[in-house]
Image (cartoon, rainbow, N blue to C red):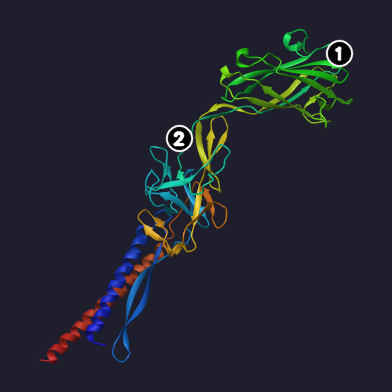
Amino acid sequence: MSLYGAMNIGVAGLAANTAALSVTSSNIANVNTVGYKNSTAMFSTFLSAVEGGSGAAGVTMRVGQNVNMQGLPTNTGSPTDLSIAGNGFFVVASNPDATGSQMYTRAGNFIPDQSGNLVNAAGLYLLGYQLDSNGNVPSDTSDLSLVNISSLAGTAEGSTTLSLKANLQASSPVVAYTAGQMASGAVTPEFQRTVNVYDSQGGSQPVSLAFVKTAANTWAYEASYAGDMTKITGTNPMGTGTVTFNTDGTLANVNGAAPASANFTLNIPWSAASGLAAQSIDINLGSVNGAAGLTQYDTPSVLNGITTNGSAFGSVTGVDISEDGTLRAQFSNGLSWDVYKIPLATFSNPNGLGQVTGNAYYATKGSGSPSVNLASTGAAGKIQSATLEASTVDLANEFTNLITTQRAYSASARIITTADEMLQQLDVLGR
């Protein structure tokens, strides 16, 4: 090998260690970058063949990615800060139109922009599945859209169930009764209470439940609307029937159903002018042969409790995100609503991903195509809300790399100066 060859090896050493310094510098600069994966300077030799088959070993350097490494999760308290426990990447777009190629990142420091779209510190927009009214993802699983939390409207919920706990006095007199006479006023109920239920628009609507004894252990009931009669079609009562009791005062049957039942369904005939959706309410009077609901004991008739579901209109108060990526809106009326599912993309070789500005990646031939699945399914990990994944950079290790890289660079420079001195000596001898 000639002295010129030695100088070239020194130059190669300078170039390789300069590139290694860039890798270490990048790692140190990103020690606090959310979701950053440290890179590694990987040195290897190359031979310069000469006549006779011998050669001199030079050096080259390439950057090794450690994308499959996972940083420690750190708590933040913000529900839209997300980290991933296990495999996977958030699917993101570079613009609010969600056009162009999709990218992938583990930097989950998302906050809503002025339009309510979740975007991270690098300006990348989170993509997810918008759920239908039944909480289902789109049939086309490639149909990803921007996750927007400001477009969520308030909501109300109509009542569908009502549970009654009361006692009807066993010694009440038997009354001659024909269906509808309690609502018309021809017969005075032994027991009557008005309860409020919610309609489909969140309005409170009064419904009266009245009972009268018609035979031993047998009572008639009427369910009537106690509000503006123009809101319903037909006349009161809306529902009638009978309730029977066992000799021990427990509930035996409602409406003579076979097998015995403790429930009946009240259909409220809202008129077209009301603008309300048709509504059916399951009235639960307890359990057959039980004493937890409606009973007949020889004590004064009394209401022990009424429970109904449904809710008045409520506005959005916040969101939470579960481990399976479900983004749930919380409302001031206590309701919650599943709005989005945030999927995760996995790769057969994540270290083969291409890197782009913004601590994000794109699929390459080396990484394989992305497999987009719901979190906590298949190879995809779990989503952790209110946490961020810390950088995987070990600062102490990087400072050590700085020292060794500087030493190697100085040594390579020394090779060049030494070879230069030797060439100068040869030049003197050759004169």
- Work out whether 360 lies above or below 309: below
Residue 279, given in percent of the width and then of the height, sits at 64, 25
Say which mark, if any, is on residue 151.
Answer: 2
Identified by mark 2, the residue type is: Ser
Please report the residue visible at 58 percent of the width from the left and 19 percent of the height from the top: 272
x 33%, y 63%: residue: 25
Name the amino acid type tagged 1: Val
Q: Nearer the viewer, residue 110 or 217?
A: 217
Q: Nearer the viewer, residue 257 or 429?
A: 257
| Residue in view at x 55 percent, y 58 percent | 379
Q: x, y percentage for residue 160?
A: 66, 28
Q: Quadrant of residue 232?
A: top right
Total marks in image: 2
Q: Label 1, on which residue?
A: 174
Placement of 69 over or under 8, stated as above or below? above
Q: Secondary structure at mark 2?
A: loop
Residue pictured at 77% horizontal, 15% vertical: 191
Q: Earlier in the sequence, mark 1 or mark 2?
A: 2
Q: Which quarter of the rendering shows the C terminus?
A: bottom left
- Is residue 417 toward the left or the right of residue 342 in the image? left
